[in-house]
Image (tube, grey):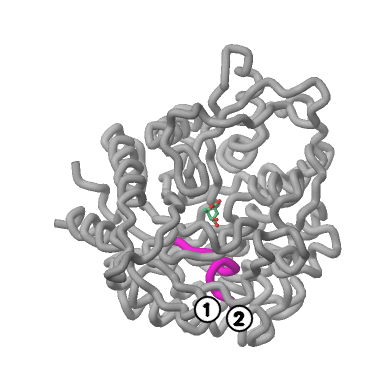
Amino acid sequence: MPLPDGFQWGVATAAYQIEGAVAEDGRGPSTWDVFAHTPGRVRDGQTGDVACDHYHRWPEDVALMAGLGVDAYRFSVAWPRVQPTGTGPANAAGLDFYDRLVDGLLERGISPAATLYHWDLPQPLEDAGGWMNRDTAHRFAEYAGLVAERLGDRVDTWITLNEPVVVMAYGYAFGIYAPGRALMLDALPTAHHQLLGHGLAVAALRGHGADRIGITNHYSPAIPADDDSAEAAGAFDALMNRLFTDPVLTGAYPDLGGLPTDFVQTGDLDVIAAPVDFLGVNYYQPTWLAKPAADSPLPFDMVDAPGDLPVTGMGWPIVPEQFLGLLRGLRDRYGTALPPIVVTENGASFADEPGPDGTVDDADRIAFLDGHIRAMRTAIEEGIDVRGYFAWSLLDNFEWAEGYEPRFGLVHVDYPTQRRTPKRSYAWYRDLIAASRA
Ligand code: FCB
């Protein structure tokens, strides 16, 4: 069955993971700069100071995208380049970088898909409470307007937030990502304030004529580890999946088991439920859940996947059927309220290194992508409206608290020399894209 008209194949990246140049052209510090420079937070003390040096090497990277034949490129705009302190007028030099990038993409016929927030909050906003502070939502909408004012005439697709669940859970609840706060369930307001920021940003973007706006959520299907764990799996699904989708698509929060929601003010849910043009779906792996211990601060316990499943280089279980299940589940749960889906991230890390002849033979990544793209195509055949697929990632890059060890790229990066080597998966993806158009 052919793909729907206008289906986009793409690749995705994020600013802090690839750009480097953290102090150039007036960029201010983000929570990730501060976190990565705090001893013990990131593996081997690694930081995004240089990363893939994409800030300077972007023409080479755009040429790599052109070689793949992608329709679209999902990148993120670094808020601290645009507003170094998180408020105030735009820093023109910071926006100039994205201006050049967008023009470079368009010259190659690649459609720009800009994510406004991929976790790099300006540190001064964090110092004022970060996403625990409702005002951050208003700051985010102001920033969104500044970016749209400059790039709105050329950016085709806007994504407000990337994976707000990870910011809430890893950043504010468990303390393993920036800003490193361990508030457990008291982190809940960060979900609401991000969603409010999303809704306010949608309005700001519409004000600049944007007509293709979405939010990207991270989905991890919840699997009960045993007969006793259905309730724990349901609690995980509510807090980690539905919490970020129900309000946007249905204007209501899921049942949160009696957790306080006094931070929700009258009218907020109307703002959050402003129509979006697509739902961005990131999928990597399901999660197995068990009943928590009596003294656990959480209503679930995340446990190991069954030992017989294949895993990626980071130990993430490889289960493409769960990706299909996720797409079906979204259709079943949201019905006519579900906008078209765009798969904004999917991919795998493996310990790829060039062989003696210089090539990187990443057969395991090809198998991963093949399995998941097949699952997506089955969903499309079943009538689920999927309009795009973005592989994570174009390049090996800074994988947050895991530093540079995991390699997710279709292109290998030798960090000491910054040499880019397309892996075998790059040629495979290029051929798949070409074949899907034939
Ligand atoms: C996602 C993130 C992305 C990348 C992949 C592996 O959760 O959005 O930045 O780190 O995981």
Task: Tell which of 287 and 343 is nearer to you.
Answer: 287
Mark 2 Cβ inside 8 Å of ligand 1: no
Q: Quadrant of the N terminus?
A: top left
Q: Which residue lies furthest to the front in this view?
A: 356
Q: Mark 1 points at which residue?
A: 53
The answer to whether 253 appears left or right of 322 in the picture is right
Residue occupying the point 82% across, 33% down = 260
| Magenta segment | 12-20
Q: Residue 204, relative to residue 249: is it above or below?
A: below
Residue occupying the point 56% across, 69% down = 15
Q: Is residue 390 magenta?
A: no
Q: Residue 366, relative to residue 139: is it above or below?
A: above
Image coordinates for residue 188, horizontal then vertical, percent: 76, 41
Task: Tell which of 203 and 234 is nearer to you.
Answer: 234
Image coordinates for residue 407, horizontal then vertical, percent: 47, 59
Q: What kind of residue is marked 1?
A: Asp
Q: Name the residue under label 2.
A: 21
Pointer 2 with pointer 1, Cβ within 8 A = yes
Precedes in sequence: disc 2 or disc 1: 2
Q: What kind of residue is marked 2?
A: Ala
Quadrant for residue 301, please give it: top right
